[in-house]
Amino acid sequence: MWVVPLAPICGVMGIVFNNRLLSRRPRVAVIRLSGTIGGAGRGGGLNDAALAPLIERAFRRGKPVAVALAVNSPGGSPVQSSLIAARIRRLADETDVPVHAFVEDVAASGGYWLACAADRIWADESSILGSIGVISAGFGFHQLIDRWGIERRVHTAGRSKSTMDPFRPENPEDVARLHTILEPIHQAFKDHVRARRGTRLSEVRDLFTGEFWAGREAVRLGLADGIGHLVPKMKALYGDRLRFEVHGMRRPLLRRLGLSAEALIDAAEDRAAFQRFGTRG
């Protein structure tokens, strides 16, 4: 006759019971979108290739009652912004899951492009939102090299190959050509914001000049839907029993510790991008 101890069985049954209870609790998938937006070069910025599996899991793992985007980005690549936002919208439509964006410090330029992928945008009173524009920046060194007697030698096949060469005087024809590129990108940005925000946008002022605003003013202008933080707002909307499952990009250990050259470069670039919008209490 086999005697089976009751305590281990009760313990196993308790674990199974608790897991079932946990699995029945409504779940919100949280996608962290923090940092500058860029290609997959050094791996420091947000890009569609790296985020794709995280976004897929967030929408398709189980059936979340909602997806929350925790956005903290000063912008970056318009193409990567568009790809990430389009992926979020595609999965939201396929799974019929509502999406809420929660702006932390900044959702500006491409960061605001990402926030607009949500059905509703929430912000802190001190969050910065907007900067709906496109920028191309550089330096001109032609006077410096002239002063030092340095001769610039450039040979091209194709007369426009050295457009905007920083070691030559700025050419009005090059500037005009650059604007033919910037304007369509700006138009695509405006179209995206109008399509997502619709009649919520204020008609009192032009919101597409590249200006940016703090939380309550952004709400008044229709760039956001209200003031609110992620956990309390989602609980208010979907109930106190919510559990949150966070999805974020993982970085190699040396990058997390700031012990690689790439990490130092990324940190400097991020700091410069955020400082355009940064305020300190």
Image (cartoon, rainbow, N blue to C red):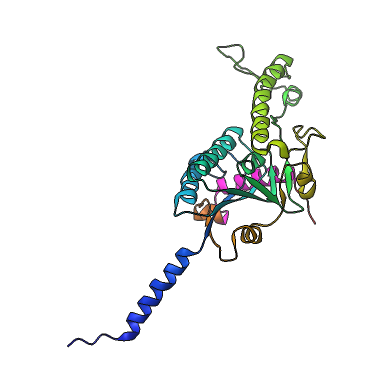
Location of residue 143 with respect to 14 vertically, above or below? above
Image quadrant holding the N terminus, namely bottom left
Q: Is residue 6 left or right of residue 240?
A: left
- The answer to whether residue 229 is seen in the rendering is yes
Q: Magenta segment: does it hold 57?
A: no
Front residue of 155/233: it is 233
Which residue: 68% across, 36% down? 198
Near-viewer residue (242 or 49): 242
Q: Residue furthest right?
A: 204
What range of the chain is rendered magenta?
257-277
Q: Given the current orientation, which residue lies at the most extreme left position?
A: 1
Q: Quadrant of residue 269?
A: top right
What residue is rendered at 49% in x and 52% in y?
A: 252
Say if residue 151 shows up in the picture.
Answer: no
The picture places residue 124, in percent across and down from the top left corner, at 73, 54
Where residue 227 appears, as percent x and y from the top left, is: 73, 53
Residue 31 image point, x, y percent? 55, 51
x, y (%) of residue 207?
76, 35
Q: Main secondary structure of the magenta part?
A: helix
Quarter of the figure that contains the C terminus: bottom right
Residue at x 47%, y 64% (from the top left corner):
24
